[in-house]
């Protein structure tokens, strides 16, 4: 949603550039994309245009910016800079460059003019994109430091498997924010701050987690299958998984391909004929015989009914299937009390 501003960015920058010599003005226009084409030129490209070095272009740019800040035109635009600063505070005091510019306008040319006003404005500070954070602007350095530190701590508290609804990630974020004014403790501001981080992101279902996790950075059918099954919340047939992927994510998922991906990925467990569950739900992997073995390894000797009850929690199979597997003397034995245990393999010398 765009915010209405009372000034016209293109008129403001035109006024600010009015007092510059012609070449300095052209360098600024080309450097910041303030012309008709809205294309920003590199130092090298501008240098080639004028037959000078990139360092000389940089010197002309820096001198031009300094002259603008000292000019009468700059003082005359004080109301414009004051309005931008108030808007910054309203939006959270620190905001990613992309978010701020798109918040004010969807037009690329207008965004370039607003960006230039930020560059020359005394109140605005820019931090370049790094491994942790996107390009961002702020008006309060102390606040920016607190937000950065809270985002780092939030990221460090999450594992690759964690997926949190938006309300939960906001509450977790608040736990790491110390001594931040109440005016910033609202959902919209906190979501803007979260979007500054390159390490945190949300998946197509709006759940937040580690940006590099396959649960967030979905790349293929198996990742969409995981999210679809997680949303479903209980074991589901692979045909229904394929259908859910199409309905939830508008992605074509062939039934055979989906089944193939479920078989290959350890996040999924076959629990019945064509029925799959997520391993994170606690289901045991393996065929029924392996499930019985794992149950006995965990609980020790059990009666027939106890084994059936525990296996049926792990697999959607008939009781008789469990009984048939239990009767295999190579793997299971029954004691005098009617309890079953695992046949220990004899070691060969």
Image (tube, rainbow, N blue to C red):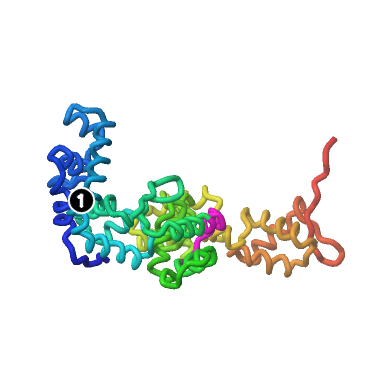
Instruction: Check residue 202 for magenta coloring.
Output: no
The residue at 20%/43% (across/down) is 28
The residue at 66%/64% (across/down) is 311
The residue at 24%/40% (across/down) is 61
* Residue 333 image point, x, y percent: 80, 57
- Figure check: 176 above or below 129: below
Q: Quadrant of residue 31?
A: top left
Q: In which quarter of the image is residue 293?
A: bottom right
Considering depth in this image, is 199 or 37 the residue closer to the camera?
37
> What quarter of the picture does the N terminus occupy?
bottom left
> What quarter of the picture does the C terminus occupy?
top right
Q: Would residue 206 be found to the left or right of residue 301 on screen?
A: left
- Figure check: 41 above or below 279: above
Instruction: Check residue 160 for magenta coloring.
Output: yes
- Would you name the residue on which mark 1 appears? 71
Secondary structure at numbered mark 1? loop
* Residue 175 image point, x, y percent: 54, 66
- The part of the chain drawn in magenta is 153-165
Considering depth in this image, is 179 or 74 the residue closer to the camera?
74
């Amino acid at each position: 949603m765009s915010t209405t501003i009372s000034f016209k960015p293109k008129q403001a920058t035109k006024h600010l550039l009015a007092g510059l010599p012609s070449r300095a003005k052209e360098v600024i226009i080309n450097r910041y994309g303030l012309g008709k084409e809205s294309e920003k030129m590199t130092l090298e490209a501008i240098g080639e245009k004028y037959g000078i070095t990139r360092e000389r272009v940089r010197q002309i740019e820096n001198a031009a910016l300094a002259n603008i800040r000292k000019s009468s035109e700059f003082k005359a635009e004080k109301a414009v800079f004051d309005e931008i600063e108030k808007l910054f505070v309203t939006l959270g005091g620190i905001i990613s460059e992309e978010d701020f510019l798109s918040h004010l306008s969807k037009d690329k040319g207008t965004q370039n003019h607003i960006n230039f006003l930020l560059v020359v404005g005394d109140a605005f500070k820019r931090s370049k994109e790094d491994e942790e954070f996107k390009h961002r602007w702020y008006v309060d350095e102390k606040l920016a430091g607190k937000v950065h530190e809270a985002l780092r701590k939030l990221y460090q508290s999450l594992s690759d498997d964690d997926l949190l609804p938006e309300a939960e990630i906001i509450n977790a974020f608040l736990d790491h924010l110390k001594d931040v004014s109440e005016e910033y403790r609202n959902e919209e501001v906190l979501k803007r701050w979260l979007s500054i981080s390159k390490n945190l992101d949300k998946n197509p279902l709006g759940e937040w987690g580690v940006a590099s996790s396959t649960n967030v950075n979905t790349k293929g059918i198996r990742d969409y299958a995981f999210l679809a099954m997680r949303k479903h919340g209980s074991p589901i047939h692979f045909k229904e998984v394929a259908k859910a992927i199409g309905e939830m994510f508008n992605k074509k998922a062939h039934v055979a391909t989906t089944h193939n991906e479920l078989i290959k990925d350890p996040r999924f467990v076959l629990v019945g004929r064509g029925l799959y569950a997520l391993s994170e739900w606690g289901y045991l992997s393996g065929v029924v015989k392996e499930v019985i073995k794992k149950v006995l390894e965990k609980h020790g000797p059990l009666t027939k009914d106890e084994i059936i009850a525990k296996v049926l929690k792990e697999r959607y199979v008939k009781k008789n299937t469990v009984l048939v597997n239990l009767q295999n003397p190579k793997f299971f034995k029954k004691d005098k009390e009617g309890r079953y245990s695992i046949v220990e393999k004899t070691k060969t010398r």
